[in-house]
Image (cartoon, rainbow, N blue to C red):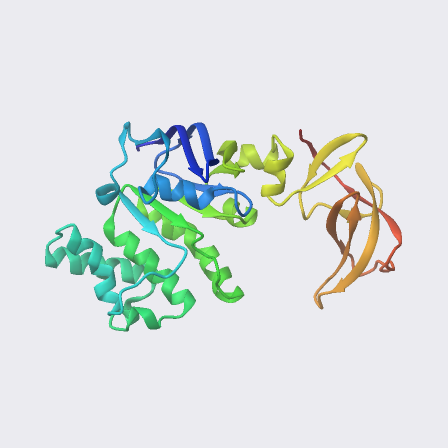
Amino acid sequence: MMDLECHGVRVERNRRAVIEIESLRVRGGRTTAILGPNGSGKTTLLRVIAGLERAQAGRITFGGAPVVSGSSIAFVFQEQVFLTRSVRDNLELGLRLRRVESAQRRARVNDAASLLGVSHLLDRRADRLSGGEGRRVSLARALCLRTPLVLMDEPLEGLDERTYSRLLDELPQLLSAFDATTLLVTHNGREALQLAQDLVVLVDGRVHAAGDKRDIATRPPTSAVAEALGYFVLSAGGRSVAVAPDALRIGTGAVPFSMVVERVLDLVERREIVGRIGEARVRVPIEAHEVPPSADDVVIVHAERSNEVS
């Protein structure tokens, strides 16, 4: 499988660097999530790789050769971008542009539509699809192309909760059908960990971590990486530590903290305390047998483990 590499890539807007990557290697044949807060340059990096924007400096290679967008890349946009024609016509468009003969076009479209569960939509107008249907059709259109490099910009953004949960569960298996090097942009740490094998954490246009997701998630090297993954970054004994968002519990333990209670949330199936540990706002579940505190109470909470971060 071919690796994607970026060397000395710099993108400027209004004389300010929005992307500055000295060196980055994305391992071939795997799904890599580009993770980071809003405004960190994730989509810009994806568009530069795709050739939709120009970098002021640097080079990007795929398999050791310059990226050729027309033949090697399929791009799944965050927005639904369709011709006002049938779903079938939209799926066939890229294949027609690549001069794929008609019988193979039909076979690829039917295969991709079946895999994504949109065969019943092939004759419907593409601009009249629901959000979930549109996402599936966008993925099917990319799959039809059978390119070695697939780029996805927030593929699950804007979906209702039910559709989001279903596609989040299904997407890892669907991505494996691409048999490609896949990069997807997200700002959601849980989404990144569920969909990808590797992570690239981008903050302020710079790579703060890159590699196997387990290595990064279990030992985030900096507070910026920990926060991008959804960890709480707290002060413990004069050190900054990263604590997983579901790790805090009421009571004393291995790593204790004082928490000022702001309010108690009744979520019907469970209750949570919302409050502050230092400057960080955190949420802590309340067990059924525990008496909930009141606003402005100070309670002791703990985590069984944490990771020191810089």
**Residue 185 can be seen, yes or no:** yes
Residue 303, image x, y percentages: 75, 41
Q: Can you say whether 89 is above or below 13 in the image?
A: below
Residue 199, image x, y percentages: 49, 38
> Residue 3's image quarter?
top left
Is 7 displayed left or right of 293 in the figure? left
**Farthest residue toward the front?**
14
**Residue 180 can be seen, yes or no:** no
Q: Residue at coordinates 28% horizontally, 30% vertically from top-left?
A: 63
> Residue 149's image quarter?
top left
Q: Nearer the viewer, residue 283 or 11?
A: 11
For the N terminus, the image quarter is top left
Q: Residue at coordinates 70% horizontally, 45% vertically from top-left?
A: 247
Residue 13, image x, y percentages: 44, 40
Is 225 displayed left or right of 163 in the figure? right
Q: Can you say whether 218 is above or below 274 in the image?
A: above
Residue 210, image x, y percentages: 49, 32
Q: Can you say whether 290 is above or below 31 in the image?
A: below
Q: Residue at coordinates 76% horizontally, 44% vertically from top-left?
A: 279
For the C terminus, the image quarter is top right
Count every numbered label the image shows and give the total. Answer: 0
Q: Nearer the viewer, residue 275 or 244?
A: 275
Is 144 displayed left or right of 309 in the figure? left
